[in-house]
Image (cartoon, rainbow, N blue to C red):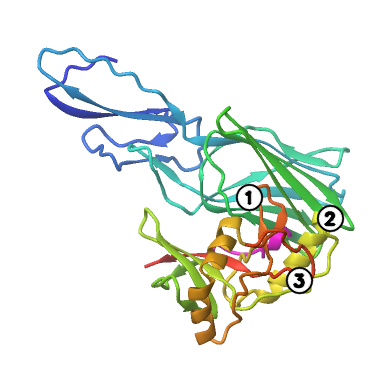
Amino acid sequence: MKLKLMEGMYHVCAVAGAGSDYVLPSLEDAKMESVISLKQGKEHADLMYAKNSVVILAGETNKLDLSLERKVMMMQEVKISNVPETVTGVSVTIAPLYENLCLDGMYSGINGSRTVTLTNESGTGVWKNTDGIYLLEASGNTTVTVRMTDAEGTKSYSYSFSNGLKANYRIRIEGTYISKEGILLSGTMTGAEWAGERIISFSFNEDGSSGTGTVPGGENVIEGEAPVAGTMYEGCYVLSNSKNGDGSITVVLMSGKNKFGLQFDAGDQTSVSSAVSQAIAELAVDGIERWRLPSLEEVKAVVSGYDKINKVLKGAGAETIVPDLSFFYVTDEGTISSYCVKGNPDFGKATRLRAFATLIFKQ
């Protein structure tokens, strides 16, 4: 396009893919923070975005090139295999997701979600969806929830991992139902060359407990003032307190107690997940849901700051951190491992487990 402009500095923003399915700001009202939102009942398109600045001087001709970057990920395929004939419905939900894109290229709204209803391929035991659904990035620690419905009702199985889903990835989720051992669900995200590949894998069993220490439940959104980092909240240590773009505050909690003596087959992640899930359920605090294992970064933060943390834990009558021991954590690939600051960590009965939870406080 060509424009005749007065002298000055201009910020040029380009949004590709935001067609008639979106609510766009008017020319008169457009600001950098203006929101581009989906109309009710519509689906995201392949949104791309670019921004640059240019100084216009009298008598000069300027040419500005904009390189677009993708602002969405694509859920390419969701498939659950070996589903019993008695099941009448299967769906998969991903949350939390950003809700909108702004003219400055930032996201807004942190409580979005997307549920995909799978279709039964008659006679095969396979339920799937291959529509290629575009989603905005995850707004925090991501939870994948599978729901299966039969004559007795609906069972939900959830798994959370600390690194959220990012734009420019294609997501493929494949699960297999195993009646005695539960469901094994794995996913592969394949992005552009610079993004590489990442595997997400987790398991959950018939009684509804989830893999890698996730407790199925709600969104942990709390009305009120957020506790300060380095204090206690509901018997738990507040590991971090960070402000979000919408004014809400994300708080990460660590349980005041720990568990050890877990019994599992170290070479079998399903066995490890089952033992860890049971232990986390025992550490969970009433009123707070979606307890999980920490990430490696969170474990390192606890061990490196143990002296300061222990002073707070002692004052509250909670169990202190012994820094030289080994601690469970969940890897970026979704597997359960252990960390010890001295190296050569234990992975067995001596390994300590602390449960973590992420809360969002809104005033």
Q: Position of residue 96 (x, y in %)?
A: 53, 52
Crowding at mark 1 (Cα within 10 Å: few <14, some 14-19, many 20+):
some
Q: Tell me: 301 left or right of 53.
A: right
The quadrant of the image that shows the N terminus is: top left
Which label sits on residue 93?
A: 1
Left or right of 13 in this view: 223: right
Whole-Å distance between the Cαs marked 2 and 3? Answer: 18 Å
**x and y, in percent, of residue 244 in the image:** 40, 56
The amino acid type of the residue labelled 1 equals Thr
Magenta range is 211-219
Find out whether residue 121 is within the magenta segment: no
Q: Residues within 10 Å of mark 2 (few under 14, many from 20)?
A: few
The structure residue drawn at horizontal position 60% and vertical position 49%, both measured from the top left corner, is: 94
Distance CA(mark 2)–CA(mark 1)? 27 Å
**Left or right of residue 112, residue 275 in this image:** right
Q: Nearer the viewer, mark 3 or mark 1?
A: 3
Q: What SS does tag 2 mark?
A: loop
Determine the image quadrant of residue 57: top left
Q: Earlier in the sequence, mark 2 or mark 1?
A: 1
Q: Indicate the amino acid at tag 2.
A: Asp
* Relative to 155, 98 lies left or right: left
Q: Secondary structure at mark 3?
A: loop
Q: Residue at x 84, y 47 (%)?
A: 83
Across and down, in percent, residue 10 comes to 21, 28
The label number, if any, that marks residue 353 in the structure image: none
Q: Earlier in the sequence, mark 2 or mark 3?
A: 2
Residue labelled with disc 2:
268
Residue on which disc 3 sits: 350
